[in-house]
Structures are given as structure tokens and as C-alpha cells.
Amino acid sequence: MNEDQESRYQCVGICMTDPDSGYCLGCGRPPEDSPTVVAEIAVPTPEAPHPGRDPDTPA
């Protein structure tokens, strides 16, 4: 983003992207190029106890 665009879209501390247009709902800044790295959230699941093993004894 160049200096002219920086002065036109002053950040107001509310950074939320409109899912339809991609514009910032706080300052109206246009969408930037999409990043080349995408992160995904991995939710760990607890391990099920094995039958026949005492759950209070470490493996």
C-alpha cells in the first residue's frame, strides 16, 4: 500500500473484514492481496482410555 492510500484510510482500531466485499468495516481499507501462507486450526481430541489399562497409571 502506498503513502497516499495510508493517509486516505486511517486505522480506527476496528479491524474486521466484510466477508462479501473484503473491505475493512472499521476504516474502509480495500482488500490486500491474499497471503501465500494459510493457517488452519487443529483441535486436539482427548485420547480414549484403552480397555484393560488402569487410567490412573501412566503409560
Image: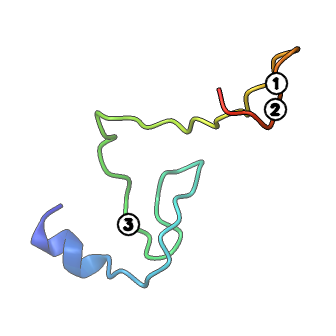
Which residue is rendered at x = 31% and y = 40% of the image?
A: 35
**Residue bearing the label numbered 3:** 29
Q: Secondary structure at mark 3?
A: loop
**Residue bearing the label numbered 1:** 49
**Residue bearing the label numbered 2:** 55
Mark 1–mark 2 CB contact (< 8 Å): yes
* Residue 47, position as x, y percentages in the image: 73, 27
Spatial CA distance of label 1 from label 2 is 7 Å
Answer few, some or many: residues within 10 Å of disc 2's Cα (few below 14, many 20 plus, some between 14 and 19): few
Specify whether 53 is left or right of 15.
Answer: right
Which residue is rendered at x = 34% and y = 40% of the image?
A: 34
Q: Secondary structure at mark 1?
A: loop
Disc 3 marks a residue whose amino acid type is Arg
Q: Earlier in the sequence, mark 3 or mark 2?
A: 3
Above or below, 28 relative to 18 = below
Spatial CA distance of label 1 from label 3 is 51 Å
Which residue is rendered at x = 53% and y = 51% of the image?
A: 21
Q: Earlier in the sequence, mark 1 or mark 2?
A: 1
